[in-house]
Image (spheres, rainbow, N blue to C red):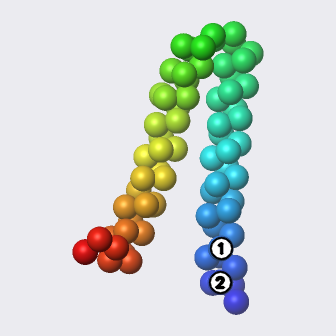
Amino acid sequence: MRHAFETWITPIMIGGLILFMCFIIWDLAKKSRAGRFGTIMLFVVLGAGMLGYVLKVVITWTLESGVGV
């Protein structure tokens, strides 16, 4: 039972954390009056870590499930 709960709650919570981090980046850009280019740069630079994590999860899932092999 616990394993099943952890299996479906972990992606939901990590997704929520990623959305919250996007809100923080947007709020930082708004409060600092970064402008369009500055906002894009904030999302690119600070969002690179989140993108790296998402890619790691996708690659790990692909290798473990044998998709494309």
Compared across the picture, whether 21 is left or right of 31 comes to left
Number of disc labels: 2
67 vs 38, left or right, is: left
Q: Secondary structure at mark 1?
A: helix
Disc 1 residue type (three-letter): Trp
- Residue 62 at x, y = what percent? 37, 68
Quadrant for the N terminus in the image: bottom right
Q: Residue 60, image x and y in percent? A: 38, 66
Q: Is residue 25 above or below residue 18?
A: above
Q: Position of residue 49 (x, y in %)?
A: 48, 41
Looking at this rendering, what residue extends furthest in the left direction? Answer: 69
- Residue designated by label 1: 8
Determine the residue positioned at 54% across, 22% down: 40
Q: Point out the image quarter for the C terminus.
A: bottom left
Q: Dot 2 lies on which element?
A: helix
| Label 2 crowd (10 A; few <14 / some 14-19 / many >=20) | few
Q: Amino acid at mark 2?
A: Ala
Quadrant hosting residue 61 = bottom left
Q: Taking 66 as reference, is 26 above or below it?
A: above
Look at the numbered discs 1 and 2 and tell me whether their residues touch, using CB distance below 8 Å: yes
Residue under numbered circle 2: 4
Q: Is residue 12 above or below residue 39?
A: below
Q: Position of residue 38 (x, y in %)?
A: 56, 14
Which disc is residue 47 wearing? none
**Mark 1 and mark 2: span between their CA atoms?**
7 Å
Taking the spot 43% from the left edge, 46% from the top edge, the residue there is 52
The residue located at (74%, 15%) in the rendering is 31
Crowding near pointer 1: few (<14 within 10 Å), some, many (20+)?
A: few
